[in-house]
Amino acid sequence: MSTRLVQIGHLAVATRPDERIKTIGLGSCVAVIIIDAIRGVAGMAHVVLPSARGDDPASKPEGYYADTAVTVLLKKMSAHGSSPRTGPLTVKITGGAAVGEQRNSMNIGKRNVLAVKRALWRHRLTPIAELVGGHDARTVTVDVGTQSVVVTVPNKEPEEL
Protein backbone atom coordinates (compact mmCIF):
# COMPACT_ATOMS: atom_id res chain seq x y z
CA MET A 1 0.00 0.00 0.00
CA SER A 2 1.40 3.39 -0.96
CA THR A 3 1.03 6.45 1.24
CA ARG A 4 0.88 10.06 0.08
CA LEU A 5 2.21 12.33 2.78
CA VAL A 6 0.51 15.73 2.91
CA GLN A 7 2.93 18.34 4.17
CA ILE A 8 1.88 21.47 6.08
CA GLY A 9 -0.19 23.70 3.82
CA HIS A 10 -0.42 21.16 1.03
CA LEU A 11 -3.17 18.90 -0.25
CA ALA A 12 -3.50 15.60 -2.09
CA VAL A 13 -6.08 13.58 -3.98
CA ALA A 14 -5.91 9.81 -4.34
CA THR A 15 -7.97 7.48 -6.51
CA ARG A 16 -6.49 4.00 -6.12
CA PRO A 17 -7.90 1.61 -3.50
CA ASP A 18 -4.37 0.67 -2.45
CA GLU A 19 -3.48 4.28 -1.54
CA ARG A 20 -3.47 6.13 1.75
CA ILE A 21 -3.28 9.85 2.40
CA LYS A 22 -1.60 10.90 5.64
CA THR A 23 -0.64 14.07 7.44
CA ILE A 24 1.43 14.26 10.59
CA GLY A 25 1.56 16.68 13.49
CA LEU A 26 -1.73 18.56 13.29
CA GLY A 27 -1.62 21.07 16.11
CA SER A 28 -3.61 24.23 15.44
CA CYS A 29 -3.77 23.18 11.78
CA VAL A 30 -6.88 21.42 10.47
CA ALA A 31 -7.06 18.43 8.15
CA VAL A 32 -10.03 18.57 5.79
CA ILE A 33 -10.88 15.13 4.44
CA ILE A 34 -13.36 14.74 1.59
CA ILE A 35 -14.32 11.28 0.35
CA ASP A 36 -16.41 10.22 -2.63
CA ALA A 37 -17.08 6.55 -1.87
CA ILE A 38 -18.99 5.96 -5.12
CA ARG A 39 -16.12 7.08 -7.35
CA GLY A 40 -13.31 5.97 -5.01
CA VAL A 41 -11.80 9.43 -4.68
CA ALA A 42 -10.37 10.86 -1.46
CA GLY A 43 -8.72 14.19 -0.78
CA MET A 44 -7.07 15.91 2.14
CA ALA A 45 -5.89 19.46 2.80
CA HIS A 46 -3.59 20.43 5.70
CA VAL A 47 -4.86 23.93 6.50
CA VAL A 48 -2.52 26.24 8.43
CA LEU A 49 -4.35 29.58 8.73
CA PRO A 50 -7.96 30.77 8.44
CA SER A 51 -7.50 33.23 5.57
CA ALA A 52 -5.05 34.83 3.20
CA ARG A 53 -5.95 38.33 4.42
CA GLY A 54 -3.02 40.57 3.64
CA ASP A 55 -1.00 37.73 2.11
CA ASP A 56 -0.64 36.73 -1.50
CA PRO A 57 -2.22 33.23 -1.60
CA ALA A 58 0.02 32.36 -4.55
CA SER A 59 3.05 32.69 -2.26
CA LYS A 60 1.95 29.72 -0.15
CA PRO A 61 1.06 26.08 -0.93
CA GLU A 62 -2.49 25.41 -2.17
CA GLY A 63 -3.81 24.05 1.11
CA TYR A 64 -2.38 26.75 3.37
CA TYR A 65 -5.46 28.92 3.89
CA ALA A 66 -8.91 27.61 4.81
CA ASP A 67 -10.67 30.16 2.63
CA THR A 68 -8.96 28.82 -0.51
CA ALA A 69 -7.94 25.22 0.34
CA VAL A 70 -11.44 23.72 0.24
CA THR A 71 -12.15 25.20 -3.20
CA VAL A 72 -8.82 23.98 -4.59
CA LEU A 73 -9.30 20.51 -3.09
CA LEU A 74 -12.78 20.21 -4.61
CA LYS A 75 -11.44 21.39 -7.97
CA LYS A 76 -8.73 18.73 -7.93
CA MET A 77 -11.28 16.07 -6.97
CA SER A 78 -13.57 17.19 -9.80
CA ALA A 79 -10.79 16.30 -12.25
CA HIS A 80 -11.56 12.70 -11.20
CA GLY A 81 -15.33 13.09 -11.63
CA SER A 82 -16.07 13.89 -8.02
CA SER A 83 -17.90 17.02 -6.88
CA PRO A 84 -20.84 18.05 -4.69
CA ARG A 85 -22.98 18.09 -7.86
CA THR A 86 -22.08 14.57 -9.01
CA GLY A 87 -22.94 12.73 -5.86
CA PRO A 88 -22.66 12.52 -2.12
CA LEU A 89 -19.37 13.56 -0.56
CA THR A 90 -18.37 12.65 2.98
CA VAL A 91 -16.50 15.36 4.86
CA LYS A 92 -14.54 14.92 8.08
CA ILE A 93 -12.23 17.33 9.90
CA THR A 94 -9.65 17.03 12.65
CA GLY A 95 -7.07 19.24 14.32
CA GLY A 96 -7.54 22.78 15.59
CA ALA A 97 -5.85 22.09 18.91
CA ALA A 98 -4.14 24.51 21.26
CA VAL A 99 -0.76 22.81 21.64
CA GLY A 100 2.02 23.99 23.96
CA GLU A 101 2.60 27.73 23.92
CA GLN A 102 -0.37 28.27 21.61
CA ARG A 103 -2.83 27.66 24.45
CA ASN A 104 -2.89 31.31 25.47
CA SER A 105 -2.37 32.90 22.08
CA MET A 106 -4.78 34.00 19.37
CA ASN A 107 -6.90 30.81 19.29
CA ILE A 108 -5.60 29.90 15.83
CA GLY A 109 -6.92 26.34 16.20
CA LYS A 110 -10.49 27.47 16.88
CA ARG A 111 -10.28 30.09 14.16
CA ASN A 112 -9.03 27.46 11.69
CA VAL A 113 -11.93 25.12 12.51
CA LEU A 114 -14.49 27.90 12.02
CA ALA A 115 -12.86 29.07 8.78
CA VAL A 116 -12.81 25.51 7.40
CA LYS A 117 -16.49 25.06 8.24
CA ARG A 118 -17.35 28.37 6.56
CA ALA A 119 -15.41 27.34 3.45
CA LEU A 120 -17.23 24.00 3.38
CA TRP A 121 -20.63 25.69 3.85
CA ARG A 122 -19.94 27.87 0.80
CA HIS A 123 -19.91 24.61 -1.17
CA ARG A 124 -22.97 23.31 0.70
CA LEU A 125 -20.88 20.75 2.58
CA THR A 126 -20.94 19.92 6.29
CA PRO A 127 -18.62 17.60 8.21
CA ILE A 128 -20.32 14.39 9.32
CA ALA A 129 -17.55 13.76 11.85
CA GLU A 130 -14.96 15.88 13.58
CA LEU A 131 -12.30 15.53 16.24
CA VAL A 132 -11.15 19.08 16.92
CA GLY A 133 -9.80 21.22 19.74
CA GLY A 134 -8.08 19.92 22.82
CA HIS A 135 -4.36 20.13 23.44
CA ASP A 136 -2.95 17.14 21.53
CA ALA A 137 -1.22 17.06 18.18
CA ARG A 138 -2.79 14.54 15.82
CA THR A 139 -1.85 12.39 12.85
CA VAL A 140 -4.58 11.40 10.41
CA THR A 141 -4.61 8.64 7.80
CA VAL A 142 -7.23 8.10 5.10
CA ASP A 143 -7.48 4.68 3.44
CA VAL A 144 -8.92 5.23 -0.04
CA GLY A 145 -10.06 1.61 -0.48
CA THR A 146 -12.01 1.36 2.79
CA GLN A 147 -12.74 5.10 3.16
CA SER A 148 -11.62 4.85 6.79
CA VAL A 149 -10.21 7.91 8.53
CA VAL A 150 -8.04 7.11 11.55
CA VAL A 151 -6.74 9.75 13.95
CA THR A 152 -3.83 8.98 16.24
CA VAL A 153 -2.57 10.91 19.23
CA PRO A 154 0.61 9.99 21.14
CA ASN A 155 -0.07 7.66 24.10
CA LYS A 156 -3.72 7.09 23.14
CA GLU A 157 -5.59 4.48 21.16
CA PRO A 158 -6.25 5.34 17.48
CA GLU A 159 -9.74 6.69 16.85
CA GLU A 160 -11.76 6.24 13.68
CA LEU A 161 -13.74 9.26 12.53
Image (cartoon, helix red, strand yellow):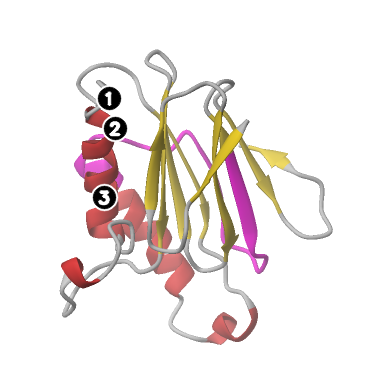
Give the residue number, with chain letter if any, for mark 2.
Answer: 77
Give the residue number, with chain letter if any, for mark 3.
Answer: 119
Label 3 is placed on what type of residue?
Ala
At numbered mark 3, what does the secondary structure look like: helix, strand or loop? helix
At numbered mark 2, what does the secondary structure look like: helix, strand or loop? helix
Q: Is residue 53 magenta?
A: no
Q: Are marks 1 and 3 in contact (CB under 8 Å)?
A: no
Q: Is residue 6 left or right of residue 154?
A: left
In front: label 3 or label 2:
2
Q: Is residue 15 left or right of residue 99?
A: left
Q: Are marks 2 and 1 in contact (CB under 8 Å)?
A: yes
Give the residue displayed 30% in from the left and 63% down from the top: 61
Return the mark for residue 80. Answer: 1
Residue 35 appears in the rendering: no
In front: label 1 or label 3:
1
Which mark is first along the chain, 3 or 1? 1
- Rendered location of residue 8, percent (x, y): 45, 64
Give the residue displayed 21% in from the left and 72% down from the top: 59
Magenta span of residues: 120-141
Give the residue displayed 55% in from the left and 21% down from the top: 145
Label 2 is placed on what type of residue?
Met
Determine the CA span between mark 3 and mark 2: 16 Å
Please state which of residues 121 and 64 is positioned toward the viewer in this rendering: 64
Which quadrant, please, contains the N terminus? Answer: top right
Label 1 is placed on what type of residue?
His
